Amino acid sequence: MSKTTQQTIDVIVWQACYTPNDTINLSHYKDYVLTMLFIKYISDIYKEKLQELEEKYSDNPQRIERSLQRERFKLSKDTTFEYVLQHKESEHLGEIINKVLEKIEINNPENLANIFSNLDFNNETLLGKTKKRNARLKHLLESFNNPKLDLRPSKLSHKNVLGDSYEYFLSHFANVMLKKEKTFFTPPSITTLLAQLLEPQEGDKIYDPTCGSGTLLIKTAQELTTANFRLYGQDTNAQTLALCKINMFFHNIYDTQLEWGDTLTHPLHVEDGKLKTFDIVLAHPPFSLDNWGAKDLKEDQYKRFERGMPPKSKGDYAFVLHMLATLNERGKMGIILPHGVLFRGASEGKIRKQLIDENLLDAVIGLPANLLFDTNIPTCILLFNKQKTTTNILFIDASHTFTKEKNQNILHKEHIHNIVETYKEKKESLHYAHYATLQEIQTNNYNLNIARYIETFEECQITPLEDTKKDIEHIEKELKQVQIQLAKLLEDYEVQRREN
């Protein structure tokens, strides 16, 4: 039998998103679609395992039940996708789905606690009144009941096919909603770049304080050839964190600790009253976050802001300082930020100077504009390393190396490779990379604006002489026509002046 491919999953998921003759806000509806995809997935796992056990222990139902209770996801026949599908014509379909999800949470306290709590399938505001809501939910169930969508592990084309499809969906959704609203999804090219720059090692503890849908954590883990790692994350949005957990499951990653809450005001990765530390810390935090909690953190119990208090209207360095406080003595850190962090003064300037004087900053990488889904501004990556061997800082200007695709700029493999190799080798390249000394940076008053260290150069295009002659002739003709028109206007004006 044919295997279930990513293309098959992608097509069916998008069909589920669009109810015929209906419009709905995808930014909310995607959560219902992805949740139902997950229910279909764990139901198919349960179905395959149950069939296997029934064939093996057909005369011993107690043994079958004991074996099912040892599975990663514990389901029963009344908590499966098929059970919900049987009630697709019910007037109370939303309530039925909610009860099934609640029971799944109760039966899986370790893996699925609170993962569905913030999603109401009976929500009139988001899904419409009863008739409209039931029609949408029925369409969703029928879409996922497609026989081609066989998600039993033995029928998947490869073990990460669901994870790949999930990320494609999130990326495509973010692209559809391009710049209309804030998105929690970092484009794959940037997550790949940051993961490769940080070079995770076996046994690493990897942390993202603004984990969103979890793609940065997953991409970093995928750089390893071993399952010997652990992922940690926190996010302020409960539903986004639920999607993050589902993303982990789809990628067969289970050794995680993902927490819900505000990382700056209420960090939750704590041990013995101190912040837990990690080998790799990385993030794509919200840019220049206003009201990030400065007022409440003047006496921060974790002493994260002893280098200085970032301005209350811009939280960029608040995230930098929090991340550095969670970095262990051999750790590496990468953060995606707006260019303003490189040169803004006042308290940010003092913090920047302190970080450089402590020899923590390893590299500044300028990225092209229009890479992210929710902003078109140019961005940068700051890399920190607790085990630097020199006081130099590498500057890379990758702002002109990209491919334009429709409305979005993209970093392709060759662009990523060039950046990563330049960083690893700390090699200089004319108009692209410069390994600046501490003295150079001090001469620039600790301003890290990339243009101060790398000369911008644009190659001149040589125009053929014959083309130039033609251009001159064309301009001269246009000039004559303008002169004639101007003379006529002046003549008309003089006539009118005399008549008046």
Image: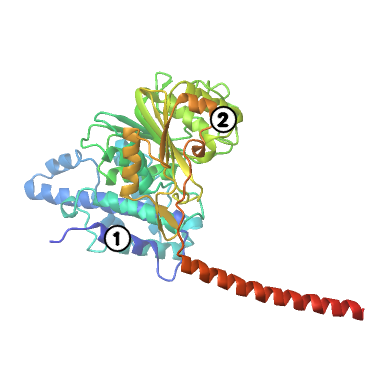
- Using the image as rendered, state which of residue 244 and residue 56 is in the foreground: 244
**Can residue 39 be seen at all in this image of the molecule?**
no
* Res. 223 image quadrant: top left
- Residue in the image at 39% along x and 25% along y: 327
Q: Earlier in the sequence, mark 1 or mark 2?
A: 1
- Residue in the image at 35% along x and 33% along y: 426
* Quadrant in which the N terminus is drawn: bottom left
* Res. 383 image quadrant: top left
* Residue 353, image x, y percentages: 52, 25
Tag 2: residue type? Glu
Q: Secondary structure at mark 1?
A: helix
Q: Does residue 375 appear to the left or right of 385 in the view shown?
A: right
Tag 1: residue type? Phe
**Which residue is identified by label 1?**
144
The answer to whether 451 is drawn above or below residue 279 in the figure is: below
Q: Which mark is residue 348?
A: 2
